Image (spheres, rainbow, N blue to C red):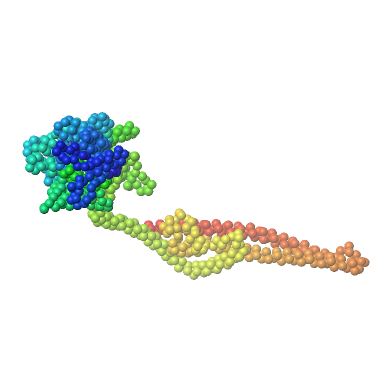
Amino acid sequence: MVKETIRVYARVKPLGRRQQAGIYSVDDNEKSLSSLEIIVPRDLADGFVNNKRESYVFKFQKIFDQEAKQDVVFDNIAKPVAECVLAGYNGTIFAYGQTGSGKTFTITGGAERYSDRGIIPRTLSYVFDQLQKDSSKVYTTHVSYLEIYNECGYDLLNPRHEASRLEDLPKVTIMEDPDQNIHLKNLSLQQATNEEEALNLLFLGDTNRMIAETPMNQASSRSHCIFTIHISSKEPGSATLRHSKLHLVDLAGSERVAKTGVGGHLLTEAKYINLSLHYLEQVIIALAEKNRSHIPYRNSMMTSVLRDSLGGNCLTTMIATLSIDKRNIDESISTCRFAQRVALIKNEAVLNEEIDPRLMIVQLKKEIQELKDELALVTGKQRTSELSQEELLELDELIETFLEDNDPDSTLDVGADMRKIKYCFIHVKQLMNHSKISDKKLLSQHISEEKDTNKEAGEEELKKLKELLQQRDNEINILVNMLKKEKKKAQDALFQLNAASAGSTVLEQSLSINLEDSWSPSSYFSLKEAKDFCSSVPRLPFLSGQAGGKMSLGCQEAFEVFKQDYADSITIEDSKQLLKQRFTEAKCLGEKLNQVRNKINHLKGEITQRHIQRAALAVSSPSENLNTLDPVEEKLRTQIEEEKKSYKTMFNRLKGLKVEIEHLQLLMEKVKMKLQKDFEVWWSEEAIHLQV
Ligand code: ADP
Ligand code: MG
């Protein structure tokens, strides 16, 4: 981006023979700004613009005095702008000054001599020269030539030479797009591939301008002419386009309305003859003011067309043309004042780059083809943008398998192929959408289906319950049968039962008291044992399996009755009684053994006592013979021997009892196992029998 104020130059026209020289001086400064001092002659000073100043000093980038030649003006003013335009920036050079001050001479040039060529032909020559030299880019050049007269635009490059009036030329209108860019409708852009073609177009435009002009309407002094060179450039292979425009503007004469008012009074503020110059000045005043948000570009066609050139994306240069003869002092000062304001305007020129969509498409297509080729090289397969019918079918199958797979770890692997991945997503989406859309339809269907499923489930449950009921019926029947049998031998059984339960209680007590460590109380059949037994016998599905591993209550009851009615119960009872006897015996023996052991210990103590007594006697009466046998001690010793014998017999007897008890315990364990087995077999048989 180039940020720059508008460059303002001054050019003083050579005086004609009859013109009276006004007094001015030029202080040309090579390094900084040059200044132009205009000295007001004494006879004018009194009334001149209502103040009495005698001299005015104005600053310019450079001042071209009367002798300055066209080539110098071009080199200094136009060449730098043309260079920027070639680089892609917009540029504008406009000439401002009163009629006859040399605007047309400066912009277009004089017709007499070749050396009088102005900025337009020289710029064209320079531009084409540069384009030819630069082979790094492809350039396209167009020109347009617009004349604005009375707020109307006319295309001067109309090839038909029928126009005898300005109104016969195609009318150009302004269009503004949503981005507030100005477009000129009907202004033809004529392509010029070389300098000659461009010069021919300039000549065509000037001819049209001349023909349309009549001495009456003085079109040339009241109209603005804008010759525009459009350049677009592009590097080969790049989609980036650069567009730039160079406006070369020959404005209408800046002279004001009657210098003297009615009655000879001087007007303090002269008005422009040309309204659009008035608006141009307003725009420039607005731009020169700080913090001014609204710039009235739209007020006139000319300011609209030059919108970018003034305070916008453009490098702009102004040439103030002056004809400083005595009569034109006030106009010269006005021109200079205008120039001073313009010099304050800051422009921001940016590179006009854009991507050409067509070129972009071509480029992207090329890139795609290259990538496809590369992919084909790597994968060994030619890849088209569409999937083949075969591939689609394969994908459908994969998706189906994936959706049906209940494994949470299952994946849908289609490989590193975006087409396939996209297809899968679309397919799944379609499936989802389809299910959503047909949800309502399916809802009723679903409900009936659900009913069916429920029915099925219900039927299954019913079947199970029926089976369970059957099972319970069996149990009840078995129990009823058992009860009937029991009734017949009621008294007997009752007695037996009572006896058995009483016996078992005694046994339980004795066992729990005496044999806690060696023998757990499992020699009789408790309800708990029966349960444990049943749960440990998986061979009985109707007992444990279906009842959730628990024996049914019926089964437990039956087991109790079965146990009491068991054929081997006598053996069990005998064993129980025997075991009881043996326990009592063992207990007695144990007690007796203790007594004998105590007695022996007591006798031993007596002997010791006897020894002490004898020793004491010997000390008191040494005449006593200690070596003689003590009959009391002898008797005690015999007693001890007898007790020892009886102890030994009793100990052996207890030893025998222990073996017998252990044997009896094993026997009972065996009987218990047999009872469980027999019950199991009997229960199964009863159940099968009832089912049949
Ligand atoms: P404008 O376009 O401002 O009305 P022109 O460019 O038509 O003025 O100039 C008026 C006359 O003065 C023309 O005949 C032109 O040839 C002549 N003239 C203007 N400037 C110069 C100059 N620098 N050198 C020689 N002749 C000039
Ligand atoms: Mg002119």
- Residue extending furthest right? 623
Using the image as rendered, state which of residue 316 and residue 233 is in the foreground.
316
Q: Is residue 475 visible?
A: yes
Q: Is residue 336 above or below residue 558?
A: above
Give the image location of residue 199, x and y in percent. 16, 32
Residue plotted at (47% across, 67% down): 489
User: Residue 68, located in which quarter of the rendered image?
Assistant: top left
Report the image quarter containing ligand 1. Answer: top left
Using the image as rendered, state which of residue 566 and residue 458 is in the foreground.
458
- Residue extending furthest front? 42
Give the image location of residue 476, x and y in percent. 41, 64
Is 522 placed left or right of 586 in the picture? Answer: left
Give the image location of residue 71, x and y in percent. 22, 33
Residue plotted at (25% across, 40% down): 26
Q: Is residue 672 above or below residue 139?
A: below
Is 270 placed left or right of 607 in the picture? Answer: left
User: Residue 641, located in which quarter of the rendered image?
Assistant: bottom right
Using the image as rendered, state which of residue 431 and residue 689 is in the foreground.
431
Give the image location of residue 146, x and y in percent. 15, 40
Is 630 placed left or right of 543 in the picture? Answer: right
Quadrant (top left/top right/bottom left/bottom right) for the N terminus: top left
